[in-house]
Image (cartoon, rainbow, N blue to C red):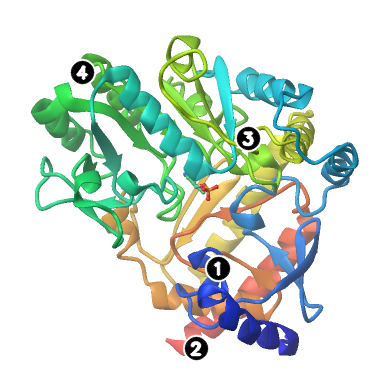
Amino acid sequence: MKSDRSTELWEQANRILVGGVNSPVRAFKGVGGRPFFAASGRGALVIDADGNELIDYVLSWGPLVLGHAHPRVVDAVQRAVAGGASFGIPTEAEIRLAERIAHHVPSIEKVRLVNSGTEATMSAIRLARGVTGRDLVVKVEGCYHGHVDSLLVKAGSGLTTLGAPTSPGIPAAHAQCTLTIPFNDLDAARTVFDARGGDIACIILEPVAGNMGVIPPEPGYLEGLRELTRQHESLLIFDEVMSGFRVSMGGAQERYGVTPDLTTLGKVIGGGLPVGAYGGPASLMDHLSPLGAVYQAGTLSGNPLATAAGLATLDALAEPGVFEAIEQALTTLGQGLGAIAREAGIPVFQTQVGSMGCLFFHEGPVRNYADATASDTARYARFFHGMLERGVYFAPSQFEACFTGSAHTDDVIGRTLDVARATFAELLAAD
Ligand SMILES: *Cc1c(COP(=O)(O)O)cnc(C)c1O
């Protein structure tokens, strides 16, 4: 794989951008080495600055469910920009995107569009606090909700003790508004609600965890949280920024039949442009300004380019068979990878829900953050580099999801599995 140009750009980037990147995970710290620079994308392929064509299972961390530069998305954005990039006054496309979201996602009656997933979770939490008049937030260990102050928090010394910041710059007072519990552990949730229920505004979680690798909820877990939050009159927030339009068209809430109070979205609903959204029943959403007292605003919220890309994406995805084919592509890939790993005698634990999945280098089971972080990350790094060197780009961290899109045809999956055979043979030799 040629890399002269990416090497040159990496040196330039490090002189002017912090760590060479604008978002930390792009620096490949989880696998070592340095990133390639993307020059363009086409379908399932990303083409780097040296002209290497890489099969892409990261897809901009999930949004590109139709692959790169899908003609319908390109056309929609080109038409939108030719008519003016932003107005800061209502446009029809905002209504249409919000309608599409509400149509697919069961719990959503009204929508507020924002510019990122982080903004969506931050705002949903403010709304939950505003509506309940309570300050505490319960967060689930290993779930990621963007870089919101009160959510960059790890567990304190005991279950019902308040949290500690995971980053400098977060006031202790913010962290102390957050209680952290393990994923898939209903007893832990009961313990915190029994102790502090009257002070808890909401619990926020990824209903299918996707930021500690992919971990599905165990049967009864989401239902249990629903019941518990009802008992204590706290709100249940599903962060479906990743799982929305990935685990089913209506997200995890549709797939598992559990209805949250508030839902946050992002990634797929922007089709590759910066969008986030949050929504719920009118009785909650109407507490937002300008109808209600909870303030939240955005100069570029509902931006015409972003809404055009999002609408084109959701409409293409909703056509018969499209969603199912994307899910099937990941199933075929997973079965192939599993067989190759077994043949090589390398223990892996595989998860998949819809078109998000993970190959843990771990004997399993992986049901929470502690399990996930016991994976063999050094072996994952060797797997990652072996695949990349042969033209297949998986996420540069054991703890990120693998995504397929509508351009991941049988041929693309077949080529990936050929590369995986060579890579696993090499892994075995390295051990
Ligand atoms: C990506 C992600 C976010 C943050 O979204 P940004 O657009 O990066 O701010 C929040 N929650 C979940 C579940 C995510 O996967």
Q: CA distance from mark 3 to mark 2?
A: 52 Å
Residue farthest top in this picture: 283
Disc 1 marks a residue whose amino acid type is Arg
Quadrant (top left/top right/bottom left/bottom right) for the N terminus: bottom right
Q: Answer yes or no: is residue 242 visible.
A: no
Mark 4 and mark 2 lie on one chain; the one further toward the N terminus is 4
Direction from residue 131 to residue 292 in the image, left or right = right
Badge 1 is on which residue?
A: 26
**Image coords of residue 335 (percent x, y):** 58, 55
SS type, badge 1:
helix
Along the line of sight, the residue nearer the viewer: 258 or 235: 235
SS type, badge 2:
helix
User: How busy is the neighbourhood of tag 1: few (under 14 within 10 Å), some, or many (20 plus)?
Assistant: some
Q: CA distance from mark 1 to mark 2?
A: 29 Å
Q: CA distance from mark 4 to mark 2?
A: 55 Å
Q: Is residue 309 above or below residue 13?
A: above
Which circle, 1 or 2, is nearer the viewer? 1
Mark 1 and mark 2 lie on one chain; the one further toward the N terminus is 1
Badge 3 is on which residue?
A: 301
Which circle, 3 or 2, is nearer the viewer? 3
SS type, badge 4:
loop
Disc 4 marks a residue whose amino acid type is His
**Image coords of residue 247 (percent x, y):** 56, 37
Q: Answer yes or no: is residue 400 visible.
A: yes
Badge 2 is on which residue?
A: 429
Quadrant (top left/top right/bottom left/bottom right) for the C terminus: bottom left
Badge 4 is on which residue?
A: 232
User: How busy is the neighbourhood of tag 3: few (under 14 within 10 Å), some, or many (20 plus)?
Assistant: many
**Image coords of residue 350 (percent x, y):** 47, 55
